Amino acid sequence: MQGGGRARIQRQRRFLLPSLPRALAHGVAAMIEERYIAGTGLTLRRTLTPGARPAGFGPQLTLSQRVRAGSRRSERVVLTDQLTPDQYGALARLPAEVLVWRRYAVRLTGHHCGLDVFSGELKGLVLAEAAFLSPEQATAFPQPAYAVAEVTGDERFSEWALVHTSADQLAALVAEYGMLLR
C-alpha cells in the first residue's frame, strides 16, 4: 500500500429520498465502484471524480474496513489506505460483490452531503448521506424536508447489505417506508 493509512471515527446519518432532485438531474457526479471482498470485511473502492482525467489524475483507489462503533447507530470506525493502481489491480482479482453508484456533492439544510444514486439491481434507490465531526453535530442535523425517512440505523441500507439486495427485495424494503420505486 502507499502508506499513510488512517483510522478515524466516521459519524454519518443516511436518509431515503424519493428521487434525484431535478436540479441535479443533469449535474456532475463522481462514479463510485465498491468491491466487497468475499469473507474479509474489506472494501476496495475506485472513485472517478469529474474532471480528474482531463487534469491528468486517475481514479482514487482505496482499501477500507468499517466497524460499527459501540451502540451509536451513526458511528463507525473506518480504517482506510490509498492504493497504487498495481495494488488495486491485484486485490480486484479477489472474489467480491460489486456495488456501483453516482455521488453528487450537495448542501442539505446548510450541511455538505453526498447524494447517492444507485444503478443495476438498485435502480431507483437514492440516499442522502451526511458526515459529522462530533456526535452533537450528528444529533443536531435535521432530517431534510423531502426525505422519506431516516435509515441510519437500518442495516438493510448499509452498503454491505445493499450489494446483496435484488430489485424485488429493494422494492419490498422501500415499501416498508411507504415508498414505491419508479
Image: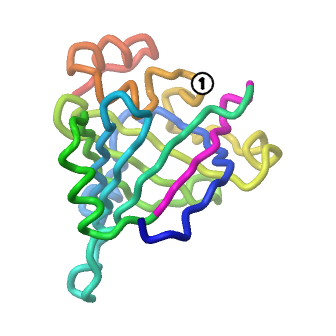
Left or right of residue 5: residue 169: left
Quarter residue 119 falls in: top left
Nearer the observer, 51 or 45: 45
Count of marks, rendered view = 1
Is the stretch drawn in magenta largely helix, strand or loop? strand
Q: In which quarter of the image is the C terminus?
A: top left
Q: Measuring 18% from the left and 47% from the top, which residue is drawn there?
A: 93
Question: Could you classify mark 1 by the number of other residues whose Cα lies within 10 Å: few (under 14), some (14-19), or many (20 or more)?
Answer: few
Three-letter residue code for mark 1? Gly
Q: Measuring 22% from the left and 80% from the top, which residue is drawn there?
A: 53
Left or right of residue 41: residue 111: right
Query: From which residue to which does the magenta span run?
Result: 71-81
Residue 49, given in percent of the width and then of the height, sits at 32, 69
Q: Is residue 130 above or below residue 30?
A: above
Q: In this view, does 102 lie above or below 86?
A: above
Residue 81, given in percent of the width and then of the height, sits at 48, 61
Residue 151, given in percent of the width and then of the height, sits at 54, 27
Q: Measuring 40% from the left and 30% from the top, which residue is drawn there?
A: 160
Nearer the observer, 22 or 115: 115
Q: What element carries label 1?
A: loop
Q: In which quarter of the image is the N terminus?
A: bottom left
Nearer the observer, 85 or 32: 85
Residue 54 highlighted magenta (yes or no)? no
Quarter residue 178 falls in: top left
Q: Residue furthest bottom?
A: 55
Question: In the rendered image, which residue does mark 1 sit on?
Answer: 153
Q: In this view, does 140 lie above or below 26?
A: above
